[in-house]
Amino acid sequence: MAKTALSAEERAKIDWEISQRLCAAAEEILGAEPDETRTVMVYLPMPEEVHLDGFMEELVRRGVRIGAPRMLPGHKLECREYREDHLETGAWGIREPDQTCPVISPEEIHAVIVPGVAFDRSGNRLGHGAGYYDRFLAECPGKRIGVCRSEMLWETVPADEHDLRMSWIITEKEALRFDGEA
């Protein structure tokens, strides 16, 4: 399926709508415990991925601890505390926390906001093919929240038995929850 060419203005509007839908679902995703006891890992986007600035602002406002991925050798990720003034450019030009940011263990993460090339209506994710998120999510017991523009929510994507389904998928038009995984 070919991507529809969206203008920068259209992308920004859709991305804001996705952020707002994430904010609306945050209590259900994170539970009723005080926000300051929660940790959410949020990816720092490549240009074509959904930008979640509005959602990150809401997490900061609520006092939620924010982590962001840092790439490691061997196609692995670690989560480090997100600090706007401690970012550097890593692999593929993606911003990531620098080495001075504290590491957050996968067990401390309540939800991981996951990017993807596409998702499907069964909760499967099609990534870029390097397996960074697949490896990380296998170690992380937190909820897996896939985000994409609605044009990238397909009926099916290729999935193997070992692939972990998302707990939720959020687009600008809908929030899909996969009970039993959430």
Image (cartoon, rainbow, N blue to C red):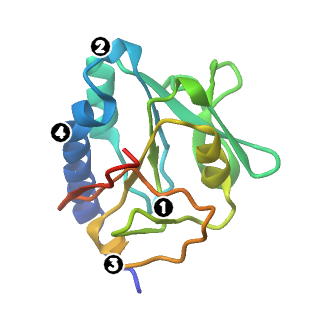
Q: Residue furthest bottom?
A: 1
Residue 15: x percent and y percent? 28, 54
State left or right for residue 63 relative to residue 70.
left
Q: Earlier in the sequence, mark 4 or mark 1?
A: 4
Q: Which residue is mark 1?
A: 116
Badge 2: residue crowd in 10 Å (few <14, some 14–19, many ≥20): few
The answer to whether mark 2 and mark 4 are in CB contact below 8 A is: no
Amino acid under disc 3: Ala
Residue extending farthest right? 74
Identify which residue is drawn at 19% across, 43% down: 20
| Nearest to viewer (mark 3 / mark 2) | 2
For marks 1 and 2, give the CA distance.
29 Å
Res 5 label: 3
**Residue 34 badge:** 2
N-terminal of the two: label 1 or label 2? 2
Which residue is label 4 attached to?
A: 24
